[in-house]
Image (cartoon, rainbow, N blue to C red):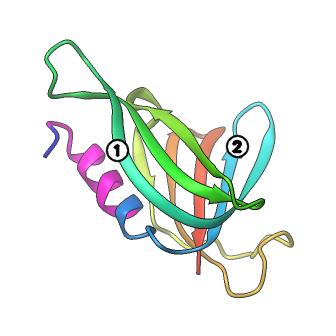
Amino acid sequence: MFNNDIHNQFAEAIKSLIGKPGIVHLQNDVDFKIIVQQFTAFEVSEHYDDERDPMIFKVSFLNEHGREDAIEIWDSAIVDLDFTVPEVTEEWVTPGLQFTFAILKDESNAIEFYAR
């Protein structure tokens, strides 16, 4: 699929969320949570000049208001994936949702995915 194995693992992990509700937890400069009624699609929205290597991934979903929405994640933000379930469940995680995985860029920047 992609030249970078981490990108292949990321694609498979996201595809396993399609059809499920969840939360996307963005941890950058701001701690932000996106409530997802249903993950709907995954695609590469932009490639590098060689047309093979992905530059930007797009994760589409129905937001909490039922409208189609998406986040875009640059390839450079995906340094590693972490499937380790946190020892402590955050108070904002609604009943029935479980930690699925996190994209790690560095120790202070992560995108966590929770799903039912």
Residue 9 shown in magenta: yes
Which residue was labeled with disc 2? 27
The residues colored magenta run 3-13
Report the side of 60 relative to 12 (left or right).
right
Residue holding disc 1? 43
Which SS class for mark 1? strand
Q: Is residue 32 left or right of residue 113?
A: right
Q: Residue at x 80, y 36 (%)?
A: 30
Asked whether, in this view, residue 93 is left or right of residue 21, the answer is: right
Q: Residue furthest top?
A: 49
Residue lying at the far front in this picture: please name it: 67
Residue type at mark 2 is Gln
Of tags 2 and 1, which is closer to the observer? 1
What kind of residue is marked 1? Glu
Predominant SS along the magenta part: helix
Q: Mark 2: few, some, or many residues within 10 Å (few <14, many ≥20)?
A: some
Which residue is located at x 62 percent, y 59 percent?
62
